[in-house]
Image (cartoon, rainbow, N blue to C red):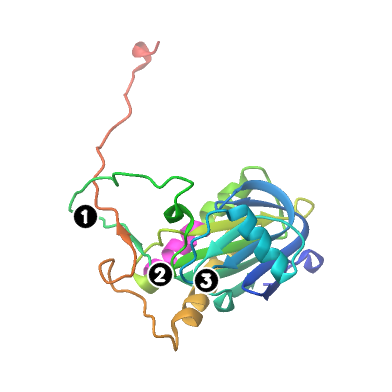
């Protein structure tokens, strides 16, 4: 499968621990720090060093981009994985780059023993709220299609679903405690009203996420002293969602019972 609009292809460069995915006049949607929807010429994935404790993220990100010589601003993801281990994949109108480490797995047992929710939630000023450990699975996704308003956020869910399926198959975990995704598109590209798994954009995204995540896992762990943990207990960090929810049902009303 080849991209029918190669002139709209996205470019990737990596230096000084910063991966930049660039495409002029793109629109992005990010789940990471300072996320949301924005227009920008690029998106970034930035490696942070071991023991990193900075909480002034705007200043820190600015320093890192300046050090790398990247003047343009755009959505930024942070990761404890070296971006030298980033791997990409291209299929049709979609390009994906992934960094993948699972020292902080987030397990979701289907038959939980029962438990309680965490007693506290980290505030924005807490280091624990912003510090990526040596894990994190980050995705930068771009399509040369011009997505409809609802298709861009839907593409994010397609990418996250593919990431979870790939990680389950490769590691036994659906994700980590700090995963994040950025998806982007070309508003001037060939229009696409939908981006679900049955569309060309959605199918290409699933294939790219699968292959990029698998390749990054191999790059990160092959020949490395670190190993993929076989359980949450065996991981450096990690959580298991053992709490049980309360089942509820919507109120069923008949025609005569309507207000």
Query: How many callouts does the rendering have?
Result: 3
Q: Pointer 3: residues within 10 angstroms few (<14), some, or many (20+)?
A: some
Camera-side residue of 117 and 165: 117
* Residue positioned 29% across, 53% down in the render: 241
Q: Is residue 112 left or right of residue 76?
A: left
Tell me whether the residue at label 3 lies in contact with that at label 1, contact meaning CB atoms closer than 8 angstroms.
no
**Residue at the far bottom in the pictured view:** 223
Q: Position of residue 147 (x, y in %)?
A: 68, 50
Residue 112 appears in the figure: yes
Q: Position of residue 257 (x, y in %)?
A: 34, 13
Q: Pointer 1: residues within 10 angstroms few (<14), some, or many (20+)?
A: few
Which residue has dot 1 on it?
111
As measured in the structure, the alpha-carbon distance from the residue carrying label 3 to the one carrying label 1 is: 37 Å
Magenta range is 159-168
Q: Pointer 2: residues within 10 angstroms few (<14), some, or many (20+)?
A: many
* Residue positioned 70% across, 70% down in the render: 68
* Residue positioned 62% across, 61% down in the render: 141
Decide which of tag 3 and tag 1 comes sooner along the chain: 3
Vertical position of residue 121 compared to residue 109: above or below: above
Vertical position of residue 249 compared to residue 59: above or below: above
Which residue has dot 3 on it?
49
Decide which of tag 3 and tag 2 comes sooner along the chain: 3
Under circle 2, the secondary element is loop
Q: Position of residue 83 (x, y in %)?
A: 58, 74
Residue 124 lies in the magenta-colored region: no
Q: Nearer the viewer, mark 3 or mark 2?
A: 3
Q: Which mark is residue 102?
A: 2
Camera-side residue of 97 and 4: 97
Residue 198 appears in the figure: no
As measured in the structure, the alpha-carbon distance from the residue carrying label 1 to the one carrying label 2 is: 22 Å
Looking at the rendering, which quadrant does residue 167 occupy? Answer: bottom left
């Amino acid at each position: 499968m080849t991209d029918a609009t190669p002139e709209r292809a996205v470019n990737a460069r990596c230096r000084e621990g910063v991966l930049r995915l660039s495409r002029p006049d793109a629109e992005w949607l990010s789940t990471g720090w300072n996320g949301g929807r924005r227009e920008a010429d690029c998106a970034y994935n930035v490696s942070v060093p071991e023991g990193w404790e900075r909480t002034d993220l705007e200043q820190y990100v600015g320093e890192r981009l300046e050090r790398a010589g990247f003047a343009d601003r755009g959505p930024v993801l942070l990761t404890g994985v070296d971006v030298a281990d980033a791997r990409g994949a291209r299929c049709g109108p979609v390009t994906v780059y992934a960094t993948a480490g699972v020292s902080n797995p987030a397990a979701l047992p289907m038959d939980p023993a029962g438990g309680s929710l965490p007693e506290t939630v980290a505030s924005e000023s807490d280091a624990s709220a912003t510090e990526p450990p040596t894990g994190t699975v980050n995705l930068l996704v771009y399509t040369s299609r011009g997505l409809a308003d609802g298709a861009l956020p839907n593409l994010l869910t397609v990418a996250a679903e593919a990431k979870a399926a790939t990680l389950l198959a490769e590691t036994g975990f659906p994700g980590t405690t700090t995963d994040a995704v950025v998806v982007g598109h070309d508003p001037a590209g060939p229009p696409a009203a939908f981006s679900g798994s049955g569309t060309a954009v959605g199918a290409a995204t699933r294939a790219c996420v699968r292959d990029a995540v698998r390749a990054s896992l191999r790059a990160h762990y092959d020949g490395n002293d670190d190993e993929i943990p076989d359980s949450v207990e065996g991981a450096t960090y990690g959580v298991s969602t053992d709490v049980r929810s309360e089942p509820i049902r919507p109120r069923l009303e008949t025609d005569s019972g309507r207000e």
